């Protein structure tokens, strides 16, 4: 079992074309680093800088930036350097910038509820996103933080018998019971028909680093290959036994030792590796405007 720490002193990574050096400040021992002296508005044109950001993303899993007073075009241009962008079937996108999803909560609709569960984005897709670049357009004076969890660490620190037990398991992920749940039944069924459930390994191999990732979250409904003679003696081993095992695995994202929490300010940004993390937008603020814009980058099939 390994416990990866990133306790190294803040590092100057390079003297770059931006006349500054990237300054990297790890925010916890496990996940997240704040980068400063970086202008994401021009980063899309700087190959060396993009390569460094990619390497830092793989290492820290979530990168944070302050004071990025950039345009939507620049936001999209930066994210596009990591892959195609995708819209979200329920949250709308900026009409002038396809792929830039608007996550807007308004003081005028205080009953809005969204993203209030630990999740990896869009695992109901066969190819869940590579990552997302999120910018804060407006936020409450206090509250409305976002948290991320390192799901490589979550897997690494599982008891060895659990690791052995889940090694070959696969699970179903569905949009229906989350984004579809509040819809009238016809609309929900249409959404489900358009986005059929996806199946993923419970332990995913990260496509770039080869790390093992615990890959179940709030979109995961059930194991698809648990009901075998090795696992099931009597019915209760499958139900509720498998559901309890799944609940235990999903709950690993709630462990504080695997987490980082980020306080937003206007023009703060976060870039996360969706393949190795989960996140949770904390709904702890009274009705007020919170406006976030997210560029979601298309990912790979899982294996
Ligand atoms: C998301 O879940 O992608 C959005 C997170 C946030 O609004 O902070």
Image (cartoon, helix red, strand yellow):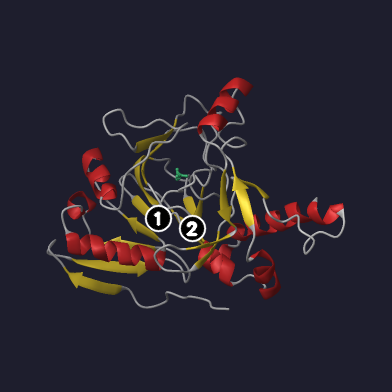
Q: Is residue 222 above or below residue 88?
A: below
Q: Is residue 143 above or below residue 163?
A: above
Q: In the structure shown, which secondary structural element does the residue marked by tag 1 occupy? A: strand
**Horizontal relation, residue 244 to residue 144: left or right:** right
Give coordinates of residue 269: x percent, y percent. Answer: 34, 50
Q: Is residue 179 above or below residue 253?
A: above
Between 246 and 190, the one lying in front of the other is 190
**Horizontal relation, residue 128 to residue 218: left or right:** left
Give coordinates of residue 294: x percent, y percent. Answer: 37, 42
Density class for disc 2 (Cα within 10 Å; few <14, some 14-19, many ≥20) is: many
Q: Which mark is residue 277?
A: 2
Residue positioned 45% across, 48% down in the render: 127
Residue positioned 55% across, 25% down in the render: 190
Q: Is residue 52 above or below residue 201?
A: below
Density class for disc 1 (Cα within 10 Å; few <14, some 14-19, many ≥20) is: many
Q: Looking at the image, in which quadrant does ligand 1 appear?
A: top left
Give coordinates of residue 158: x percent, y percent. Answer: 63, 70
Residue positioned 80% across, 50% down in the render: 239
Q: Which mark is residue 272?
A: 1
Give coordinates of residue 90: x percent, y percent. Answer: 47, 31
Q: Residue furthest right?
A: 234
As measured in the structure, the alpha-carbon distance from the residue carrying label 2 to the one carrying label 1 is 8 Å
């Amino acid at each position: 079992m390994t416990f990866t720490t990133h306790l190294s002193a803040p590092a100057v990574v390079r003297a770059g074309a931006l006349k500054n050096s990237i300054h990297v400040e790890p925010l916890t021992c496990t996940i997240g680093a704040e980068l400063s002296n970086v202008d994401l508005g021009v980063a899309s044109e700087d190959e060396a800088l993009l390569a460094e950001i990619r390497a830092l993303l793989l290492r820290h899993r979530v990168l944070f930036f302050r004071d990025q007073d950039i345009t939507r075009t620049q936001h999209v241009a930066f994210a596009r350097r990591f892959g195609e962008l995708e819209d979200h079937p329920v949250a709308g996108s900026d009409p002038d910038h396809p792929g830039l999803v608007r996550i807007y909560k308004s003081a005028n609709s205080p009953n809005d509820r969204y993203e209030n569960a630990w999740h990896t984005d869009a695992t109901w897709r066969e190819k869940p996103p590579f990552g997302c670049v999120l910018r804060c357009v407006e936020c409450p004076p206090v509250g409305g933080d976002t948290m991320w969890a390192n799901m490589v660490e979550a897997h690494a620190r599982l008891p060895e018998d659990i690791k052995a037990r889940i090694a070959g398991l696969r699970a179903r992920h569905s949009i229906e019971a989350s984004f579809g749940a509040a819809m009238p039944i016809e609309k929900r069924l249409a959404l489900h028909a358009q986005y059929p459930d996806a199946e993923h390994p419970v332990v995913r191999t990260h496509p770039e680093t080869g790390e093992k990732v615990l890959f179940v979250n709030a979109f995961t409904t059930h194991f698809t290959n648990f009901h075998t003679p090795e696992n099931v003696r009597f019915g209760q081993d499958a139900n509720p036994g498998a559901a309890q095992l799944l609940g235990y695995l999903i709950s690993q994202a709630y462990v504080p030792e695997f987490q980082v929490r980020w306080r937003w300010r206007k023009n703060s940004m976060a870039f996360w590796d969706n393949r190795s993390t989960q996140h949770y937008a904390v709904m702890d603020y009274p009705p007020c405007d919170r406006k976030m814009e997210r560029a979601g980058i298309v990912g790979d099939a899982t294996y």
